Image (spheres, rainbow, N blue to C red):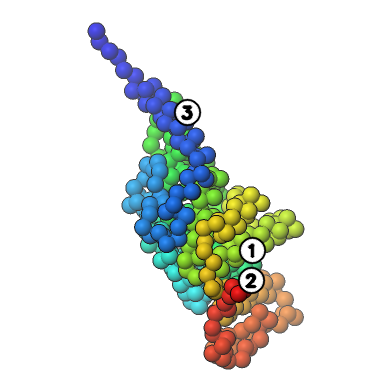
Amino acid sequence: MKLIFKPNSLLRSALALTTAFFLTQQAMVVPALADKKKTNPDEIGNRDVGKGLNLYSIEKEIGMGKQMAQEVERQAKIVDDPIIAEYVNRVGQNLVRNSDAKVPFTIKVIDAEDINAFALPGGFFFVQTGVLINAENEAEMAGVMAHEIAHVAARHGTRQASRGQLVSYATLPLIFMGGITGYAIYQGMGILVPLGFLKFTRGFEAEADMLGLEYIYKAGYDPGSFVDFFEKVQALEKRKPGTMSKLFSSHPPTDDRIKASQQVIQKYLKEKPEYVVNTSEFNDVKARVLAMHSRRKVDDTKDAGRPTLRRNPNGQIDSNGDEKAPKTDSEDRPTLKRREP
């Protein structure tokens, strides 16, 4: 007897079954967070948080992320102020060192006032100046960055895209490689980024929330600031829609996620005697960002009647553009939040 196989039909059937299995596992991501290593910040760096279906090697992930990052840099306005760029990169790299990430990070700042930060596969990370403007302290900014670093550490972008590919393979009559369905046009810039690399499932968002909390906790920051910032963003977006970038608002900080984050803090993060909340350097950099935006608005409106801003020789200015007195040693020290006896 001669058996006749239909490869495409068999492959589609197999992929359909595989897709169904992995999509049902998606709902199991949150319960899986109870894994002892994942809930123990002392195990950071000694665990594989990126496990799961993934059609991409680390090398391919880095290569794709680099290509996307180059496209972002071609069309976005990257902040070239060395003080702002170096500071944000230094805070981010400290978080990376206290994370599960297995790839090097390239961190840059985009000059845009809406609240957004996004990490591309392979460790290419962008923070918009709107995050610095709206954060009250360094710990809040670090919380936003830690959440995005967690997405990279857990390889959410390529794992999500892998699921999307399986869905495409199972439903299309002809199978072809490289088909990521759907593209997001980055707000106002015309940058095409595959949706599969930026929009995550609820399970992945919950995992990034938990990991991000662990990362800022291990780095010495107050984990409560993570919740504070997202509560602030949630309230701000209700009062003034459009405050957040469209990509950032695609996974808003819901009440459930905020409550879940509070539970993680209470259950898994042992209270420390003190936490870093803010530094004078954050205040200085935020003032530079505000001044930069003010100068740009004056230039754009061509309004000669508005005052211009003047830098002092040390480059230290406040949010009103005035010179700041030289710092004392006490001003250089970070603001600490101490536990009540």
Q: Tell me the distance, in whole angstroms, between the alpha carbons under discs 3 and 1.
A: 43 Å
> Which circle, 3 or 1, is nearer the viewer?
1
Q: Position of residue 170 (x, y in %)?
A: 44, 29
Q: Residue at x 45, y 57 (%)?
A: 40
Judge from the rendering whether residue 312 lies leftward or rightward of residue 62; answer left or right. right
- Is tag 2's residue or tag 1's residue first in the polypeptide sequence? 2
Circle 3: residue type:
Thr
Where, quadrant-wise, is the C terminus in this rendering? bottom right
* CA gap, disc 2 and disc 1: 10 Å
The one nearer the camera, 248 or 221, is: 221
Query: Looking at the picture, which amino acid does disc 1 mark?
Result: Asp
> Dots 2 and 1: beta carbons under 8 Å?
yes
Q: Nearer the viewer, residue 152 or 242?
A: 152
Q: Residue at x 40, y 59 (%)?
A: 43
Taking the image as drawn, is residue 304 in sight?
Answer: yes
Which label sits on residue 171? Answer: 3
Q: Is residue 181 above or below residue 279?
A: above
Tell me the residue that label 1 is attached to: 228
SS label for mark 1: helix
Label located before the other in sequence (3 or 1): 3
Q: Which label number is shown at residue 305? A: none
Picture residue at 62% right of the left edge, 88% below the top: 324
Name the outermost residue toward the left: 1
Foreground label between 3 and 2: 2
Where residue 11 sits in the image (x, y, percent)? Answer: 37, 26
Q: Secondary structure at mark 2?
A: loop
Towards the viewer: 270 or 234: 270
Q: Quadrant of residue 262?
A: bottom right
Q: Quadrant of residue 229?
A: bottom right
